[in-house]
Image (cartoon, helix red, strand yellow):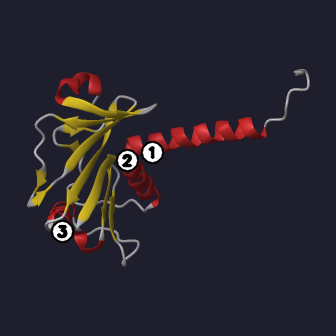
Amino acid sequence: MKFAAASVTALLVSTAHAFPNEPTGFRGLEWGDTIAARGDEFVLRQSSRDTQLFTRKGDKLAIGEAALSDISYAFYRGRFHAAAIKTQGGGNGKALFDAFLTQYGNAATPNRSANRYYWGGATALISLDCMPDYLNCMAVIASKRIADERRADENAAADRAKGDVQRKPDSSVRN
């Protein structure tokens, strides 16, 4: 999930623009749906302070012609905020790229020498990062609103920590 969080963070700094068929969720889950309401569909894979990562029971591991090696569903503070999608070998990365181009139109490519593609809109943020020759790819489809909220929470936590480090000792406290 670290990779997914980094991809979403990279998307946040990119310029948002409308793109065709901007998703409001992924595979029947809308951005913000609660895990409490749909928990019986999922199996917990990993949990941290505010984020839980799940797999979905009986999930179809394909998008278009791309066979997927994994799909993970991320819930931030109990609300669905992202899907992380992986491919491995066999032309599956290129097939996923082609499916995304067909569905979402042309992508932003900040570094043309790398296989990194971004779609950023008012509702969703999408990244697709592939190894050379598209052998292995990782895509993240995320809620812009919840990603913005998460980033604000992380910045506030960093500011609090910075304040703790820079705070002068209380002279009334003696060791």
Q: Identify the residue under disc 3.
A: 94
Q: Relative to residue 97, is residue 122 drawn left or right?
A: right
**Cα distance between the residues tagged 1 and 3:** 29 Å
Tag of residue 144: 2
Q: Label 1 to label 2, Cα distance in Å?
A: 6 Å
Amino acid type, label 1: Asp
Q: Assign the C terminus to one quadrant of the image.
A: top right
Which residue corresponds to mark 1?
A: 148
Give residue 83's position: percent from left, percent from top.
27, 45
Which part of the image, by quadrant, shows the N terminus?
Answer: top left
Q: Is residue 120 above or below residue 74?
A: below
- Label 3 vs label 2: CA separation? 25 Å
Reading the chain from its start, which is encountered first: label 1 or label 3?
A: 3
Q: Residue at x 28, y 27 (%)?
A: 35
Q: Nearer the viewer, residue 19 or 27?
A: 27
Dot 1 alpha-carbon crowd within 10 angstroms: few under 14, some 14 to 19, many 20 or more: some
Image x and y of residue 69, in percent: 18, 52
Q: Amino acid at mark 3?
A: Lys
The answer to which of marks 3 and 2 sits earlier in the sequence is: 3
Local secondary structure at mark 2: helix
Q: Are marks 1 and 2 in contact (CB under 8 Å)?
A: yes
Q: Name which residue lies at 74% across and 39% down.
A: 165
- Helix, strand, or loop for circle 3? helix
Q: Viewer-proximal residue, 123 or 138?
A: 138
Residue 64 left/right relative to 26: left
Position above or below: 28 against 171: below
Can residue 22 be seen by looking at this rendering? no
Indicate the quadrant where residue 15 lies: bottom left
Q: Could you tell me which residue is drawn at 35 percent across and 61 percent down?
A: 17
